[in-house]
Amino acid sequence: QSVLTQPPSVSGAPGQRVTVSCTGNTSNIGAGYDVHWYQQLPGTAPKALIYGNDNRPSGVPDRFSASKSGTSASLAITGLQAEDEADYYCQSYDSSLSGWVFGGGTKLTVL
Amino acid sequence: EVQLVESGGGLVQPGGSLRLSCAASGFTFSYYPMNWVRQAPGKGLEWISSISGFTSTISYADSVKGRFTISRDNAKNSLYLQMNSLRADDTAIYYCAREREYCSSNTCQKYYFGYWGQGTLVTVSS
């Protein structure tokens, strides 16, 4: 059971918009700690997709955006492409655990 | 170019030990906090340990506390994970990850996992 809760899967057709939610509590996201998102393509290491709630590292397309509110965060992907099919993970810091925590991951399927 | 290369994985019996290494290059290793993250087969990411740069402040996930030890040798640009009393549920790909600093809302010294190695597979089985 992950500290941050994500839906196991989401799907969408090419060109559509999908969102992935990430729900925490008052020890992590709700305590004001930033949320980061990672993309893991099949058979590869994770890669940073969004940092500091809503910032994209250099090279990440602006089709990817994210937001945070209260004890939750959300990743949005617009103009879905086949290459976006991957697992997506949210991450934050947890003060009660004194460490980093990840969501359980969400598998995005492009139909 | 930042490079992180893990090594030391393999097959080990339950109760055994293994030492993982992560060779870093392309940046001033001593400046940056480093982490180990693992991923069991078909499962999600699990942070297991971190170590700061200069002060070597260390933290562990409860799942490995007392069994695993993280360390670093800044002179050798290397990160280590000594794993003892291994169990079947420690079977996973182990990634090292370097934190990357950013500033937000006029506050700096915030971090995310900006760089990842390719991982090394640890299998605990008899």
Image (tube, helix red, strand yellow):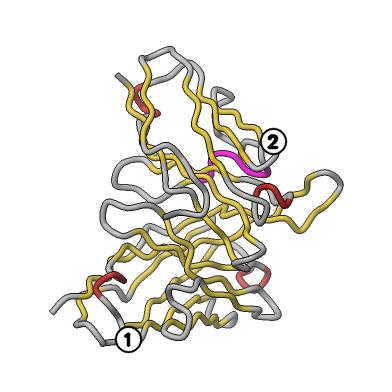
Q: Taking A45 as reference, is A55 above or below it?
A: above
Depth check, front residue: B26 or A79:
A79
B62 on left or right of B12: right
Q: Position of residue B87 (x, y in %)?
A: 27, 78
Depth check, front residue: B88 or A1:
A1
Q: Nearer the viewer, mark 2 or mark 1?
A: 2
How many angstroms separate mark 2 from mark 1 (CA)?
A: 41 Å
Q: Amino acid at mark 2?
A: Ser
Report helix, strand or loop for mark 1: loop
Quadrant for residue B105, please give it. Answer: top right
Residue located 44% across and 60% down the image: B46
Residues rendered magenta in the picture: A48-52
B121 on left or right of B36: left
Q: Amino acid at mark 1?
A: Ser
Q: Taking B104 as reference, is B22 above or below it?
A: below
Label 2 neighbourhood size at 10 Å, few (<14), some (14-19), many (20+)? few
Residue at numbered disc 1 = B85
Question: Residue B14 in magenta?
Answer: no
Residue at numbered disc 2 = A69
Number of callouts: 2
Residue located 58% across and 47% down the image: A24
Q: Position of residue A50 (x, y in %)?
A: 59, 39
**Chain under disc 1:** B
Q: For the residues labelled 2 and 1, say whether their Cβ atoms are less than 8 Å apart.
A: no
A45 on left or right of B16: right
In the displayed orientation, state which residue is furthest to the left: B126
Residue located 61% across and 32% down the image: A66
Q: Are marks 2 and 1 on the same chain?
A: no
Depth check, front residue: B2 or B20:
B20
